[in-house]
Image (tube, rainbow, N blue to C red):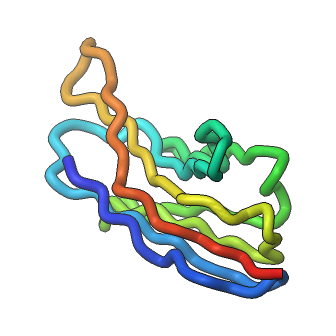
Amino acid sequence: VQLQASGGGLVQAGGSLRLSCAASGIIGSIIAMGWYREAPGKQRELLASIASGGTTHYADSVKGRCTISRDNAKNTVYLQMNSLKPEDTAVYYCNTVIRARAFVPATNYWGQGTQVTVSS
């Protein structure tokens, strides 16, 4: 399984970015897809996730500013980020949870990370 993330970059505070992550080489079923971020000196944190049925979850830090969506046909997950703040600066990672077949544990896969820098 490979996850290819894109869409990061440099943006001014108050601006917007849309991250994309395409999954390929999947064998089995995608249980959920999500976005995490890791800022310097901080632990990686979950920002948003979307389950196979469409249920979404957001961290309080981005709730109301970010929207996660998914194109099942393309195995692609998106994160629309608005009203960006300097504290949103981090490396953003996409994640997918896949179950290869029934009755076996699911496996986490990670993308390579994309840098988001928000200037004040």
Q: Is residue 86 left or right of residue 81?
A: right
Quadrant hosting residue 109: top left
Q: Residue 94's x, y, as percent?
A: 45, 53
- State the residue lying farthest toward the top: 103
Instruction: Look at 46% across and 66% down and name the residue there.
Output: 114
Instruction: Look at 21% across and 37% down and name the residue there.
Output: 28
Q: Give the answer, above or below, for where 115 lies relative to 53.
A: below
Q: Give the answer, above or below, for where 47 lies relative to 21.
A: above
Viewer-side residue, 93 vs 103: 93
Viewer-side residue, 42 vs 75: 42
Q: Residue 79's x, y, as percent?
A: 58, 66
Viewer-side residue, 35 vs 78: 35
Q: Give the answer, above or below, for where 19 lies relative to 99.
A: below
Quadrant hosting residue 23: bottom left
Instruction: Look at 59% across and 71% down and name the residue there.
Output: 116
Q: Is residue 1 left or right of residue 49?
A: left
Q: Is residue 85 left or right of residue 33?
A: right
Quadrant (top left/top right/bottom left/bottom right) for the C terminus: bottom right
Instruction: Look at 31% across and 16% down and name the residue there.
Output: 105
Q: Residue 78's x, y, as percent?
A: 51, 67
Q: Residue 53's x, y, as percent?
A: 51, 43
Number of on-image labels: 0
Q: Give the answer, above or below, for where 41 lies relative to 86.
A: above
Q: Is residue 4 left or right of residue 119?
A: left
